[in-house]
Amino acid sequence: MASAELQGKYQKLAQEYSKLRAQNQVLKKGVVDEQANSAALKEQLKMKDQSLRKLQQEMDSLTFRNLQLAKRVELLQDELALSEPRGKKNKKSGESSSQLSQEQKSVFDEDLQKKIEENERLHIQFFEADEQHKHVEAELRSRLSTLEMEAAQHQAVVDGLTRKYMETIEKLQNDKAKLEVKSQTLEKEAKECRLRTEECQLQLKNLHEDLSSRLEESLSIISEKVPFNDTKYSQYNALNVPVHNRRHQLKMRDIAGQALAFVQDLVKALLNFHTYTEQRIQIFPIDSAIDTISPLNQKFSQYLHENASYVRPLEEGMLHLFESITEDTVTVLETTVKLKTFSEHLTSYICFLRKILPYQLKSLEEECEASLCTSALRARNLELSQDMKKMTAVFEKLQTYIALLALPSTEPDGLLRTNYSCVLTNVGAALHGFHDVMKDISKHYSQKATIELELPTTTQKLITTNDCILSSVVALTNGAGKIASFFSNNVDYFIASLSYGPKTGSGFISPLSAECMLQYKKKAAAYMKALRKPLLESVPYEEALANRRVLLSSTESREGLAQQVQQSLEKISKLEQEKEHWMLEAQLAKIKLEKENQRIADKLKSTSSGQVVGVAQEKAAVATATGQEEASAKAVPEPVHSTSEAPDVESREDLIRNHYMTRIVELTSQLQLADSKSVHFYAECRALSKRLALAEKSKEALTEEMKVASQSISRLQDELTTTKRSYEDQLSMMSDHLCSMNETLSKQREEIDTLKMSSKGNSKKNKSR
């Protein structure tokens, strides 16, 4: 299959490649045609330039001819000026010469007139040729620019297609390599599969021989030992106790518990909805505290007051159904007898809904007939009346399907086993329909409450009641949605669990056979319990599981506690060493103190007795004060000496000893505090080290990603620079070409201007002549 898919994929890619290749050929042909057109236009431009040069040469020859004629005219004028004074001297001879000169003049005038006309005609031709040249040149330039743009576009398309073709070729090559690798792996797998099939065939042959021998043995045992086969007939097979499936029973009890919770929420919402609807009828459109309400609303309120007697049994019936599903029973439709009770309670509630529906519709019509009822409020009331009809219809539909599901536990022929799945699917559809209807009721009632809030006669009591009804409707909508989604999620399990029953049979034949089977199940359980021997005392299974969880969860803490104990032992040994050190220090201090006391006693003997007494009193007072402070701080009774006693060496020793003891206690407490802090800091440092290791790993991954991103960015930058350079080169070439064309055009314009100026000068001279 994989090779066929890969071959189909490869064929598709080959077809796309052939299409792209054909498009590439067409585009290449178009580009070649455009290049040929541009070359033809360039040839036409060259021919026009040659014709322009020829015209310029003719213009130059004409200007030269005009100059010659002008010089000849000047010579003739000079000769005429010289001949005039001679004419005055000899008029007679002059008359004849004048006649000759007039004839010559007339000839020259005719010749000059012809030249002038020819010059004008040439000027006109030149002007027309110039205008035509300009027009043709402008057309050719525009066409050339369009052709260049089209050529650039075609070139870009060709470049893109070639790049695309190269990418597709590379992709196809990569796919081909992958396919080759995959084909090799598939060949290897095929070889392995052949070997496995051979092994499996051998195993199958062995198993077939083994099973055939066992079958013969079991058939012989059955024929000899089994007198009666109770699984052959469905009536007898229905009495056999099925294999106990504790997981199935626990699952069914859990599902029943969830359904009970949903039904309880639904019952609570229905009670609130009916109760608050009754409260609303009492205050709108007529407040019962001010005036009497209509008889219709009185009857409607009376019926609504009885809602608890119809709604509460739904919860009780579901509770009984939940209690009937235990771990010891077999839960199928034939054994759920309490479902019939729930169906009966639901039927009674639907009768209640049918009874209050006409009054509810008439009450809404009465609200519409009120004077303050607007058109929008009337429309909402009509929508609510339709929703109430739909709600009653949905409850009737749901009750029909639940009654069908309750039939197998009471009437065995009421519902065929093949129709169970269809009925369960329809129950789910009815629950979804109930949810949709409740959503519409919530929407329309919220719109109605907002419209009534804007009415001038709306009281605070009505606003509060509307809010309560809205909250109950929202609770109903949520409860219906939860039940619908819950049933849709578990409908497959319900359909699959219907086959739970006796083996090799279609299930229980009748409720009586199911009841007998349950009795046999109880007897079998009692017999097995009687056969069970008392075991030796051991740790209970639950306690062992709990201890195992504690041990598994405290592995890391146990290691930490072991480390803490090790550290505490090390610290205790250090403290004992320090204690010995301080004891030695205390002995040394005691020896020094005795020496100092001896020295002081020697000094006191040498001094006067009065001074000794004063100093001793002062020291005794200081010693007693410090002793009292130490006693109050440490709550240790110390001997108090009177000021009248002589200086006592023992009191000072006790004072120094107490001071050192208090200091040692303070240091040990500080040391213990520091140890606890160090342990806490060690745990924190260990956690921080783990976090640091994870952070370093994430940092390494991020650095790798950053390297890849930087490489891709550098590659893209290189590609961008190369494309920029190519575009800049093309632009520079185009700008150079345009500059050269502009220079040639400017030269041609200058030449044309000079020709125009020269022709204008010649025409002026000719006119003056």
Image (cartoon, rainbow, N blue to C red):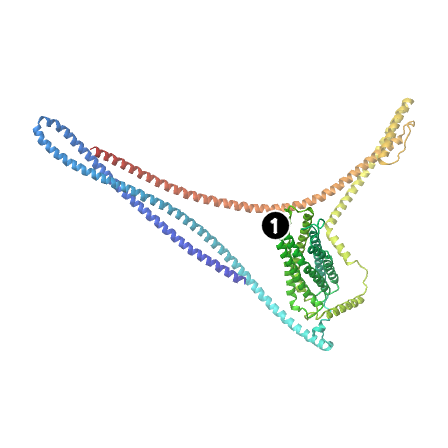
Quadrant position of residue 634:
top right
Please state which of residues 382 and 415 is positioned toward the viewer in this rendering: 382
Please state which of residues 526 and 671 is positioned toward the viewer in this rendering.
526
Front one among 102 and 262: 262
Residue, x 40% and y 41% (percent of image)? 732
The spot of residue 310 in percent (x, y) is 72, 59
Numbered disc 1: secondary structure:
loop
Which residue does the image show at 65% across and 68% down from the upper left? 418
Q: Residue at x 34, y 49 (%)?
A: 37
Residue 388 spot, x, y in % from top left: 65, 57
Instruction: Report whether residue 657 is seen.
Output: no
Mark 1: amino acid: Thr
- Quarter of the image for residue 228 reads bottom right
Residue 194: x and y in percent read 57, 66
Q: Which residue is mark 1?
A: 374
- Can residue 708 be seen by looking at this rendering? yes
Asked whether, in this view, residue 16 is left or right of residue 642, the answer is: left
Q: Is 659 positioned to the left or the right of 182 in the image?
A: right
